[in-house]
Image (cartoon, rainbow, N blue to C red):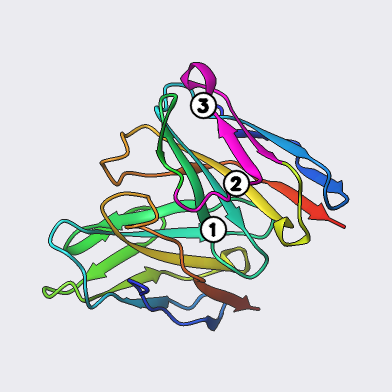
Amino acid sequence: LAKTTQPISMDSYEGQEVNITCSHNNIATNDYITWYQQFPSQGPRFIIQGYKTKVTNEVASLFIPADRKSSTLSLPRVSLSDTAVYYCLVGFAYNNNDMRFGAGTRLTVKP
Amino acid sequence: EAGVAQSPRYKIIEKRQSVAFWCNPISGHATLYWYQQILGQGPKLLIQFQNNGVVDDSQLPKDRFSAERLKGVDSTLKIQPAKLEDSAVYLCASSLEAVSYVGELFFGEGSRLTVL
């Protein structure tokens, strides 16, 4: 049973803010929420990780409501180079019983 | 800081042949992962090492896939004999943290295998 649900694809335009929501209704007390970005012909790249409330870094923000049953990755003012697949992972350890990569959300940024 | 190095970047073989992929993780990273990524899907964990010990190989097809991490540094992933469905990108990742802590994975660029 998948631990996370996220949209298969999203389109946006340059300069817009993009919000990608991930649902994780069965999140456990010890679980973290982690997002990765993957460009074609490259390995995934860590974007951000959080446990609760809001986390911000130079690339993105992660919003986590109090019940932690969903989370939103926010990318401010996207550019064409943000076109990629974005993966939401929930768990405490990278193994086949915990944090697994799903199909991700394919974001396409248009000029 | 040097990233995770993988080779070869591309490999084309015929079914039933063998192939090996090599990975050199970031210096000092104790945990090493091999993922398989089929076109259009997310990466799937094949095997996970902490130092030179296997932690999780539950999704590794052991009848044809093998992996080792001698001396707790470099790792090789071998497929013998290859099947058509093994066509994928094989990604190596490493992590500073032990397997029991979530942390951040650092991925290499991957090795793209095509089996004809």
Q: Residue drawn 35% across and 55% down?
A: A48
Which comes sooner in the sequence, label 1 or label 2?
A: 1
Q: Residue drawn 60% across and 46% down?
A: B91
Q: Quadrant of residue B20?
A: top right
- Where is residue B108 shown, x and y percent of the image? 59, 41
Judge the density around disc 3: few (<14), some (14-19), many (≥20) Cα neighbours within 10 Å.
few
Provide the residue designation for mark 3: B1
Q: Which residues are magenta?
A: B58-79
Provide the residue designation for mark 1: B43
Tell me the amino acid under the disc marked 3: Glu
Chain for disc number 3: B
Disc 3 to disc 2, how far (Cα)? 19 Å
Disc 1 to disc 2, how far (Cα)? 8 Å
Which comes sooner in the sequence, label 3 or label 2?
A: 3
Q: Residue drawn 30% across and 55% down?
A: A49
Which comes sooner in the sequence, label 3 or label 1?
A: 3
Q: Secondary structure under badge 1?
A: loop
Q: Nearer the viewer, residue B33 or B3?
A: B33
In the rendered structure, the answer to whether residue A70 lies left or right of residue A16 reads left
Residue B46 counted in the magenta span: no
| Disc 1 to disc 2: CB gap under 8 Å | yes
Judge the density around disc 1: few (<14), some (14-19), many (≥20) Cα neighbours within 10 Å.
many
Residue B7's place in the image compared with A7, above or below, is above
Residue B4 in view (yes/no): no
Q: Secondary structure under badge 2?
A: strand
Q: Secondary structure under badge 3?
A: loop
Disc 3 to disc 1, how far (Cα)? 25 Å
Q: Nearer the viewer, residue A27 or A22?
A: A27
Tell me the amino acid under the disc marked 2: Leu
Provide the residue designation for mark 2: B91
